[in-house]
Image (tube, rainbow, N blue to C red):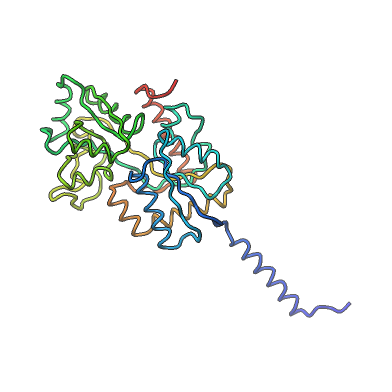
Amino acid sequence: MQKRPLRFLLACTAVFILAGIEQAAAAWEPTKAVEIIVPFVPGGASDQMARTMQGIIEKYKFVKTPIVVTNKPAASGGEAMLDIQASAGDPHKLLTTSSGIYMTPLSTKLPVNWKDFTPVAMVAQDEFVLWVNANSPWKTTKDFVAAAKAAATPMRFGGAGAKREDELLVFASGQAGGFKSAYIPYGGGAEASTQLAGNHIEANTNNPSEEIANWRAGLSRPLCVYSSKRMGYTDKVTATQSWSDIPTCPTEGLNATYQMLRGLFMPGKVTADQQAFYVDLLKKVTDTPEWKDYVARSALLPDFRSGKDFVDFLTTDEKKHIDLMNAAGMIAK
């Protein structure tokens, strides 16, 4: 048998090694359009976040296939959660989520749990603010609480839907302040903002992105932020105030705090490579100047968590919501 020249054998070996390296480096990527499902109405905070991500991904060409945003708000987001549950194994779907990931199943007996999904990453947390109409007589939280305690009828609070974060926070406010309230659910935070501007309710607990337009227009007034620390954004929103100028509720005598996760999940039964692709994608997105501008504009608390850190957060946060919802009588029996 004729022997192969050593040079030929070395060349073949190099080809095989390079092929192996190339195959190892060829991690999973989407092969068709990626759908980001938003469990709330268009225009809300979750929708704004999804469309901001969509724009960034497309601008920087982080994904070769199209990114499509779909709103499925039915059943307080339950429709979206059931869609993701039924899409097990499909790596081309993402779900944006908030605390509704726990609250909707707990309040409706929806047969789904976040553990049915694949956590990708938390990208931020939302702050909440106690807002009143700009023409109201209440200049401080203490003024408002005193008036609420003395009111002949419960103070009317508006919020973004029944048995959601706003209602839970209104309950916690009443408990902390010792007053009664009447909660009115609307179709979203934007509608709650409109109702406050029109003086149809006394207060709402909107997050910054849902109330900033009316604050800037002089139609609403922030009294306190439901946090243990002031927000860090010092640029003026109005002629005289920045987000950092809003005092915390506990320092104003209303000992209630609440922050809401903003993150993304995939369906269950996807591969580790597929999950890793989206973790890496979200890290790229959150490192862009466009994302940082969005976070500052929305007065979000930056907080990126993935892997075990995200799962640990979800486990603790779910327990906190179960306790709060039990106290508020919001868990379906």
x, y percent for residue 247: 19, 39
Quadrant of the rendered image containing residue 26: bottom right
- Residue 73 as seen in the image, left or right of residue 91: left
x, y percent for residue 252: 18, 33
Quadrant of the rendered image containing residue 158: top left
Q: Residue at x 13, y 49 (%)?
A: 240
Q: Image quadrant for the N terminus?
A: bottom right
Q: Residue at x 24, y 34 (%)?
A: 204
x, y percent for residue 284: 43, 57
Depth check: give the residue in front, 272 or 136. 136
Is 178 situated above or below 56? Answer: above
Depth check: give the residue in front, 118 or 311. 118
- Residue 152 as seen in the image, left or right of residue 268: left
Quadrant of the rendered image containing residue 42: top left
x, y percent for residue 277: 52, 54
Depth check: give the residue in front, 107 or 274. 107
